[in-house]
Amino acid sequence: MAIVSTGTKRDVNARTAQLVDLLHELGPDIPEIARRLGQFKESVRYRYKEKILNRGFAVQGAADHEKLGLKRMIVVVDFAPAYGQYAQAILAAMNELCYLVSFARTLPGGEYVVNLSVPADLTEEIERFFESLKEKGMFSRVEALEFDWLVLTPMKSQCYDFDTGRWEYDWTNPPAKANASAGRQPSTSAKFDYVDLMVIKELQMDANKSLKEISDKLGMNYKKLAWHYSAHIKARNLLQGFSVNWMGTKYDYKIEKALHRQHRYFALQLLVRDLNEYEMISLRQESNKVPFLWSEAIGKNYSAEFFFPLDFVVEGIQWLSEMMAPIKERANLFTIDQTGSVAFTIPYMLYDQALKKWRLEPSDLAQRFDNLIIQIKGGTS
């Protein structure tokens, strides 16, 4: 018997785009997604596996850092020659010491763009810590920028062909209005506890884990964990939603290695300093018109991460050049080496369960870091 197609390629792609849009809101809750789409669970589950997971797209929880009392700080550092070979090991260790959540090496300069999510009352301490490392000779350059809030931009799924893996975007006829995410406002802090952080951490790694799998991994009572997820994480919106990692970069926790889909996207990070309100609104509106924006950090400074498909690189750089023209003296555009980029979860290990607050002891941090450098140099010599 011949198999008859149930819809055109365009129809199938549109259904996949609808699925992705709901993944951003709900995560991989297939029964609820199927209910909202009015489709069979088996069909939605098959499409999710075939078009999303099997294509290398990671689905991860997107923590609302402001709800957790954390602000984004970006520090651009250049390692002194004596420390260059230890750079990535040093930065990776900072995740457990001083709120580092990701870092990326730039090309061709070799500087590192370091992202931190820092408690609002500790930003000055973190900046002093980086300056102290410069004074000790580790860094030849340190520039710290603070931001009030961070947003991960949902995938513009209507512009993507999930069968061919190609984007469709007309640079000559951009949309008149920015995408809806440009209108998002910063969150205010909410109540949370250590259990909430642990669950969020697991969902950031892989949102496909069930609560039962998470409870087993963490050794926590399932009913207690499920209550925290419902009464705290969902009720208080401690997650912005979920991210669909369309550029194909994910971390394999079984082999403890970041996996990058080589030569698919050209990554750029824009940093702009000291913006007034009008400049900020203009930048955000323009950035959110293209489907290649991954994240924004907003405050008196502005950061935007872009991933341009290789066949759109020239158009993308031309567009960025025009957008940057009015503020180019306060802007830097970094080319990111994706193979030299690593992202971590929220810094849950720095939360004091007893005091119920984020912690940082400057003297202890300095001593632990000095000991760490000795270990790193000893282990790689």
Image (tube, rainbow, N blue to C red):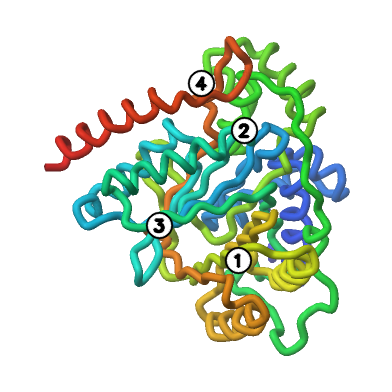
Task: Give how far apart the Cα atoms at labels 4 and 2 are.
Answer: 33 Å
Q: Residue 278: where, in percent of width, then height? A: 80, 68
Residue 245 in sight from this viewpoint: yes
**Most foreground residue, 32 or 95:** 95
Q: Mark 2 or mark 4, which is nearer the start of the sequence? A: 2
Task: Please identify the residue farthest to the front as the structure is shown.
Answer: 135
- Residue at the spot of label 3: 112
At horizontal 60% and vertical 13% (from top left) the residue drawn is: 355
Q: Answer above or below: position of 42 versus 332.
A: above
Dividing the picture into quarters, in which one does residue 314 lie?
bottom right
Q: Mark 2 or mark 3, which is nearer the start of the sequence? A: 3
Q: Residues within 10 Å of mark 1 (few under 14, many from 20)?
A: many
Q: Residues within 10 Å of mark 4 (few under 14, many from 20)?
A: few
Q: Nearer the viewer, mark 1 or mark 4?
A: 1
Residue type beneath disc 1:
Val
- Residue at the spot of label 1: 272
- Residue at the spot of label 4: 217
Q: Would residue 87 appear left or right of 321 to someone viewing this image?
A: left
**Most foreground residue, 104 or 133:** 133
Residue type beneath disc 3:
Tyr
At horizontal 62% and vertical 20% (from top left) the residue drawn is: 357
Task: Give how far apart the Cα atoms at labels 3 and 2 are.
Answer: 25 Å
- Image quadrant where one finds the N terminus: bottom right
Q: Answer above or below: position of 53 versus 282.
A: above
At horizontal 53% and vertical 80% (from top left) the residue drawn is: 313
- Residue at the spot of label 2: 121
Task: Give how far apart the Cα atoms at labels 2 and 1 are.
Answer: 23 Å
Q: Answer above or below: position of 83 versus 373.
A: below
The answer to whether mark 4 and mark 3 are in CB contact below 8 A is no
